[in-house]
Image (tube, rainbow, N blue to C red):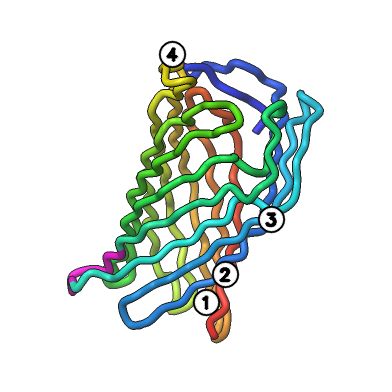
Amino acid sequence: ADETTDKNGDTHQKDFGLFNAQELIRFCYYSPDFVATALVPFGYTEIDSMNQDSSGLGDINIGAGYFLPVRAADILPMIFVEFPTGEYDSSKAANIGSHQYDIKPVIFLHKTLDKFSIDAAAKYFFRLKNDATNVLPGDEFYLQCLLCYNLTDKFKIGPSINWMISRHKEQNGVNIQDSARESFSTGADVYYRFSWLSVTFTYLYDIYTENLPRGHFFQLKTVYRF
């Protein structure tokens, strides 16, 4: 992301130079209905305009959920807790960790309609106080949706959208005016399933952001089944 935006979505800085790369290792356990998962990130983040960077272990997430007994679609409520395991320096803007806990209730939905499939998620992140700065980062609400078409039994492709809006930040119990964040991103997913491995490539572009960087997101996801 080279640009940042202000409270109105207008360009605030054109040469921000944010680069973030992560390797996310996710372990999942499935019983017929119960799901448990742990996500361990390792990454590198850099802000070129500030000559700052940070790398190493990020903030670990642990979650659990249970599929609802609904036949019309797969509906999975889960709750995640994010732990402040990543390195953090309050004097820097580039940090691999956040130095605060998040509690994340999430509802996932999957529905297959002939050759089409719909995947959607609603997420609410309760973002707790950063004790190093005495700042509440502001809770975040996400809506995400992916519509795919099966070109073959193993290959599918389709458009995706991602919308996020947050509350204002607070410092020392006082609202920081005009600090709420919003983003709307759109792109596409490409999915291919081998007999022992599934691979998904995701691309998203930030069409609109407020008080956030605006840029491009790329993800390559591989799933191994044991």
> Magenta stretch containing residue 75, yes or no?
yes
Vertical position of residue 69 compared to residue 77: above or below = below
The amino acid on which the numbered mark 3 sits, given as a three-letter code, is Phe
> Magenta stretch containing residue 126, yes or no?
no
- Residue 8 visible in the picture: no
The amino acid on which the numbered mark 2 sits, given as a three-letter code, is Val
Between circles 4 and 2, the one closer to the viewer is 4
Q: To which quarter of the image does residue 152 belong?
A: bottom left
Task: Name which of mark 4 and mark 1 comes first in the sequence.
Answer: 4
Q: Secondary structure at mark 1?
A: strand
**Residue 154 point in image, percent of width and height:** 48, 77
Q: CA distance from mark 1 to mark 2?
A: 6 Å
**Residue 116 point in image, percent of width and height:** 33, 66
Mark number, residue 103: none
Quadrant that contains the C terminus: bottom right
Q: Residue at x 56, y 66 (%)?
A: 26
Mark number, residue 193: 1
Q: CA distance from mark 3 to mark 2?
A: 20 Å
Task: Name which of mark 4 and mark 3 comes first in the sequence.
Answer: 3
Q: Residue at x 44, y 62 (%)?
A: 63
- Residue 135 visible in the picture: yes
Q: Residue at x 47, y 20 (%)?
A: 172
Vertical position of residue 62 compared to residue 51: above or below = below
Q: Which residue is mark 3?
A: 42
Q: How would you rate the neighbour count of disc 1 (Cα within 10 Å): few for under 14, some for 14-19, many for 20 or more?
A: some
Bounds of the magenta span?
70-76
Vertical position of residue 80 compared to residue 32: above or below = above
